[in-house]
Image (cartoon, rainbow, N blue to C red):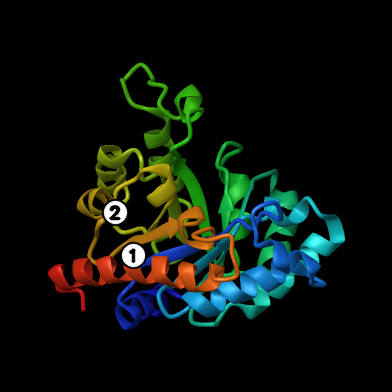
């Protein structure tokens, strides 16, 4: 999916919502456990219920890989089922030396046919550029995350009093463009989103952390907006686990629609639609 196509979907659906498919067998409704592939059946129902309200889906691969070949089968079936008008993000957080990264990229971009994959930048340029070599595919680079451990490295300052995450942004923005490189920026660090936006004004951000993690959609928009919207705001648990009963899909639909309606108002206020 190209940048132009992504922006067109945001305008069409009046939404910049990404639904995270962090599908946990211990949390899905009990009646689905009797099916041949409970993970896929759950995901299928969630996708059917939410696809008109979101522009992206983000399966976290850890929730599938832990089940071995059967989990990979569930992941592939899920990705194949996602509508083609939605950006498909493999939340895999890969990152290794060049040759290995090439094979990671082939896994997610060719075998699974995802549109995007999350990548860790710690090993530097030669671990990232193999992903960027694929046409009409996206690298979503970890920039500023919202977990407690982010303080261990990301906010460390150098002799010029600049945080490490800012150095990562400045350097990595030279490797790709706004057409193939996005950044993960946590919603719970709202004011710091503005500092990220100042360094990479034209790139899209994937923003986890609204809803269950406490981030504010209004703050994300205030500090992260750009002329292309520039935001994919992810919600996982708040949507997919809105109910643990047989009405789980309907409740997920209601939650996704609520967020979409809030986003539609924002897009209207911004004269984006």
Determine the CA span between mark 2 and mark 1. 9 Å
The residue depicted at 37 percent of the width and 27 percent of the height is 163
Give the residue at mark 2: 217
Is residue 172 visible in the rendered structure shown here? yes
The residue depicted at 63 percent of the width and 69 percent of the height is 43
Quadrant of the rendering where the C terminus is positioned: bottom left
Left-right relation of 159 to 269: right
Residue 259's mark?
1
Marks 2 and 1, the one that precedes in the sequence:
2
Measured along the vertical axis of the image, is residue 152 above or below residue 66? above
Quadrant housing residue 54: bottom left
Residue 8's mark?
none
Assess disc 1: are there few (<14), some (14-19) or many (≥20) residues with their C-alpha within 10 Å of its C-alpha. Answer: many
Measured along the vertical axis of the image, is residue 150 above or below residue 156? below
| Element at label 1 | helix
The residue depicted at 69 percent of the width and 73 percent of the height is 41
Quadrant housing residue 67: bottom right
Task: Give 250 or 47, whichever is nearer the viewer.
Answer: 250
| Element at label 2 | helix
Measured along the vertical axis of the image, is residue 185 above or below residue 49? above
Asked if disc 2 and disc 1 are in contact, CB closer than 8 Å, the reply is: yes
> Picture coordinates of residue 208 (x, y %)?
44, 50
Task: Give 141 or 171, whichever is nearer the viewer.
Answer: 141
> Picture coordinates of residue 123 (x, y %)?
61, 37
Assess disc 2: are there few (<14), some (14-19) or many (≥20) residues with their C-alpha within 10 Å of its C-alpha. Answer: many
> Picture coordinates of residue 99 (x, y %)?
74, 51
Task: Give 39 or 134, whichever is nearer the viewer.
Answer: 39
Task: Give 7 or 29, whichever is nearer the viewer.
Answer: 29
Left-right relation of 163 to 250: left
Is residue 75 visible in the rendered structure shown here? no
């Amino acid at each position: 999916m190209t940048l132009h196509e992504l922006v067109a979907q945001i305008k069409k659906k009046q939404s910049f919502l990404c639904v995270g498919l962090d599908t946990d067998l211990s949390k899905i409704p009990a009646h689905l456990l009797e099916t041949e592939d409970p993970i896929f059946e759950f995901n299928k129902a969630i996708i059917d219920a939410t696809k008109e309200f979101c522009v992206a889906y983000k399966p976290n691969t850890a929730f599938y890989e832990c089940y071995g070949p059967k989990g990979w089968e569930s992941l592939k079936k899920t990705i194949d089922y996602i509508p083609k008008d939605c950006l498909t993000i493999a939340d895999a957080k890969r990152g290794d030396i060049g040759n290995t990264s090439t094979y990671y990229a082939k896994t997610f971009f060719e075998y699974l046919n995802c549109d995007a994959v999350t990548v860790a930048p710690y090993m530097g340029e030669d671990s990232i550029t193999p992903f960027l070599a694929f046409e009409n595919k996206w690298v979503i680079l970890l920039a500023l995350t919202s977990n407690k451990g982010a303080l261990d490295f990301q906010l460390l300052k150098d002799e010029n009093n600049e945080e490490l995450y800012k150095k990562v942004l400045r350097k990595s923005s030279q490797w790709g463009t706004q057409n193939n490189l996005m950044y993960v920026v946590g919603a719970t660090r709202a004011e710091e989103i503005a500092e990220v936006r100042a360094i990479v004004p034209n790139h899209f951000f994937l923003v986890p952390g609204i809803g269950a993690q406490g981030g504010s959609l209004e703050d994300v928009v205030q500090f992260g907006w750009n002329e292309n919207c520039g935001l994919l705001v992810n919600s996982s648990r708040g949507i997919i686990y809105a109910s643990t009963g047989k009405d789980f899909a309907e409740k997920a639909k209601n939650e996704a629609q609520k967020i979409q309606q809030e986003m539609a108002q924002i897009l209207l206020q911004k004269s984006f639609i």
